[in-house]
Each structure stands twice: as structure tokens, then as C-alpha cells.
Image: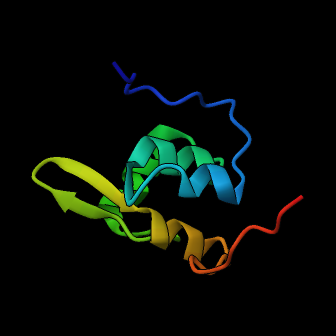
Amino acid sequence: MLSNSIDMNITWTQEAIEGLGVRTDLKTALGIFGMGTTAGYKAAKRGDLPFPVLTIGRKYVVPVAGLLKALGIDADDKIPAA
């Protein structure tokens, strides 16, 4: 069974972010941007984050494509082979 917790000490590369799938939770998105959860949730409520946040019921959902765009990464860019 997969764990719902994300290792907040992860190094967020383009590949790691894309590996999240189509969407992620707000806490993970805040970690990618190096933001704390308290300030981040307040900013989400105000609509004041650099990436799109959807409200579904009482949950915040963040599209991964929006995270990549906010980071200046084209979601269609391919990671070069090492």
C-alpha cells in the first residue's frame, strides 16, 4: 500500500515533480516552493500563491502542470538523458 505522506526532505527535480502525476496536495506543492504550511494555507485561501490551487469540497488540489509552469518549466519539455 502506498503511503499518503511525502518526504519533505526530497530534492524536487523536474522528474520528481512530474512523477507526482496529474495533481498533488497543497502541502506537497508548498514544500516544492519551500513554503511553510500555515502561511501557505492562508495564501491559498486568499488566492495568493504563484501556482493554481483548486478547491474541491474542503480540499485543496494543485495541478502539477501549474506547478511546472510557475517554476518556468514547460510541461512538454523532456528531461535530457544523462
Q: Measured from the top left, where is residue 54 in percent x and y?
A: 26, 64
Q: Residue furthest right?
A: 82
Quadrant of residue 21 within the rendered picture: bottom left
Q: Measured from the top left, where is residue 81 in percent x and y?
A: 83, 63
Q: Is residue 44 above or below residue 41?
A: below
Quadrant of residue 46 within the rendered picture: bottom left
Q: Is residue 46 above or below residue 17?
A: below
Q: Measured from the top left, where is residue 4 in percent x and y?
A: 37, 27
Q: Residue at x 42, y 58 (%)?
A: 43
Whether residue 49 sits left or right of residue 75 in the image: it is left
Whether residue 58 sits left or right of residue 62 in the image: it is left
Q: Measured from the top left, where is residue 76 in percent x and y?
A: 58, 80
Q: Can the viewer see residue 82?
A: yes
* In-front residue for pair 21/11: 21
* In-front residue for pair 49/5: 5
Q: Residue furthest top?
A: 1
Q: Is residue 26 above or below residue 4?
A: below
The quadrant of the image that shows the C terminus is bottom right
Whether residue 24 sits left or right of residue 36 in the image: it is left
